[in-house]
Amino acid sequence: MEVIDAVFLGIIQGLTEFLPVSSSGHLEIGKALLGDNSIPEESLMVTVVLHFATALSTIVVFRKDVAEIFRGLFSFRWNEETQFSVKIILSMIPAVIIGLMFEEELEALFGGDLTFVGFMLLITSLLLWLADKAKNTGKPVSYKDSFVIGVAQAIAILPGISRSGATISTSVLLGNDKGKAARFSFLMVVPLIFGKIAKDLLSGEITNSTIEPMPLIAGFIAAFVAGFAACTWMITLVKKSKLSYFAIYCFIVGGIAIAYEYAYA
């Protein structure tokens, strides 16, 4: 993999991890456009590095929130921070179960099938359009809501379904405050990303990767910078009810992906 390709994929990952347009779907499209013929170990290594960069950017953006959560947890009291942590854990359960039970089936979907990605982007577009029409409230995320949002996150494992789009839209449609929905959406994924990275490293699947370090470093930096900018921007956009623009974008990109696959199949 060339450095320029890694930077390109890093920017895609950083932007689309937080913007509700599906990072997995765009990475599949990006790999298809670049003619990615890398062996599985190299492709997985790039994915791990880029996801680590975006997880780190999330921690930096929400560093005060993360610090408060840890302080609350170590006070060993049933306070707001502890309750928030329990909600995060509840939201992780569906994705963990689905990820472990259907790991091989899910991996098979990441094979460059742009028709499938396109249709999933159309579903993301519909979710965003519905959420944009919902009224803003001051309601916080409840325990029940946390689990339902977690189900949406599990479904978003599919390439083309935006994780942030699905979780934020589901939260808003449940009547939660848009700003709180965005905060919860971004923080709930951090433990899952680190868990997935640890699993991939421990599995030994990427130990035989022959990819050079420079593309990985370049991709990491690109993903971190793009992720930091996108995360900060997205919080503002959700509060201002600007999700309809992303709904239109996903609809267009989904349509193009389907047309491209049929034209060059």
Image (cartoon, helix red, strand yellow):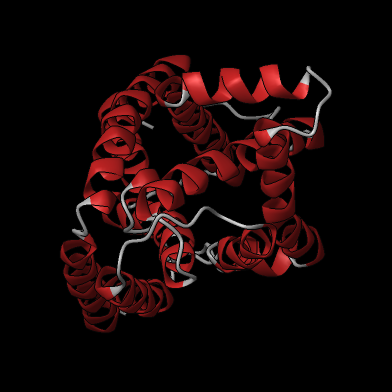
The residue depicted at 41 percent of the width and 48 percent of the height is 182
The residue depicted at 33 percent of the width and 28 percent of the height is 228
Q: Which of 41 and 54 is in front in this view?
A: 54
Residue 13 position by quadrant? top left
Q: Position of residue 211 (x, y in %)?
A: 51, 26
Query: Can you say which quadrant of the picture contains the C terminus?
Result: bottom left
Say above or below: 235 vs 27.
above
Q: Is residue 60 visible?
A: yes
Q: Position of residue 263 (x, y in %)?
A: 21, 81
The residue depicted at 58 percent of the width and 62 percent of the height is 149
Extreme-bottom residue of the structure: 262
Q: Is residue 28 visible?
A: no
Residue 120 position by quadrant? bottom left
Q: For the image shown, how many numbered marks are present on the structure?
A: 0
Q: Where is residue 69 in the image (x, y as percent from the top left)?
A: 64, 26
Q: Nearer the viewer, residue 256 or 232?
A: 232
In the visual, does 41 lie left or right of 103? left
Q: Nearer the viewer, residue 68 or 125?
A: 68
Q: Where is residue 72 in the image (x, y as percent from the top left)?
A: 70, 23
Say above or below: 163 vs 244.
above
Query: Can you say which quadrant of the picture contains the N terminus?
Result: top left
The residue depicted at 53 percent of the width and 64 percent of the height is 156
